[in-house]
């Protein structure tokens, strides 16, 4: 059997209203699946970057240049 820890989280009132309208949905399962999806992406990113020599500063600079090039290509700059 898988051991599970309880977690409390806050949601905006608007979201809670939607959740209340759909009581048939197992919202804890939806949240658990979303958390797993995010965790898998983070694990993949960790694996891909584990041997990288780029610093965070380098990565941010590359990202800035890419964003600028995309903006230029689409006539936004």
Image (cartoon, grey):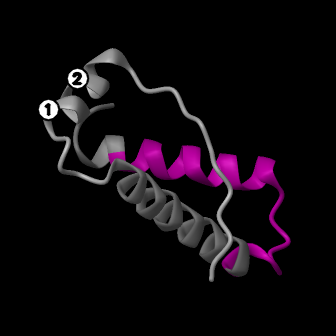
Q: Nearer the viewer, residue 73 or 6?
A: 6
**How far across and down, in percent of the image, does residue 22 sit?**
15, 40
Q: What's the residue at 35%, 56% (across, down)? A: 30
Q: What's the residue at 38%, 20% (across, down)? A: 12
Q: What's the residue at 17%, 50% (across, down)? A: 24
Mark 2 sits on what residue? 17
Label number found at residue 71: none
Q: Compute the Cα span from label 2 to label 1.
A: 6 Å
Q: Which quarter of the figure has residue 14? A: top left
Q: Do the CB atoms of the residues marked 2 and 1 lie less than 8 Å apart? A: yes
Name the outermost residue toward the left: 21
Confirm whether the magenta stretch covers residue 64.
yes
Q: Which quarter of the figure has residue 18? A: top left
Vertical side of 51 occupied by 42: above or below: above
Looking at the rendered structure, the secondary structure element under dot 1 is: helix
Q: What stretch is highlighted in magenta?
A: 48-70
Q: How many labels does the image show?
A: 2
Mark 1 sits on what residue? 21
Which SS does the magenta portion mostly show?
A: helix
Q: What's the residue at 33%, 31% (across, down)? A: 77
Q: In which quarter of the image is the N terminus?
A: bottom right
For label 2, the crowd category at 10 Å Cα-Cα, with few meaning under 14, some 14 to 19 and many 20 or more, is few
Confirm whether the magenta stretch covers residue 59.
yes
């Amino acid at each position: 059997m898988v051991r599970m820890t309880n977690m409390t989280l806050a949601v905006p009132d608007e979201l809670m209203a939607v959740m209340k309208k759909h009581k048939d949905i197992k919202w804890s399962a939806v949240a658990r699946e979303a958390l797993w999806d995010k965790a898998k992406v983070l694990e993949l990113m960790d694996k891909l970057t584990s041997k990288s020599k780029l610093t965070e500063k380098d990565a941010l600079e590359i990202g800035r240049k890419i964003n600028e090039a995309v903006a230029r290509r689409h006539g936004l700059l």
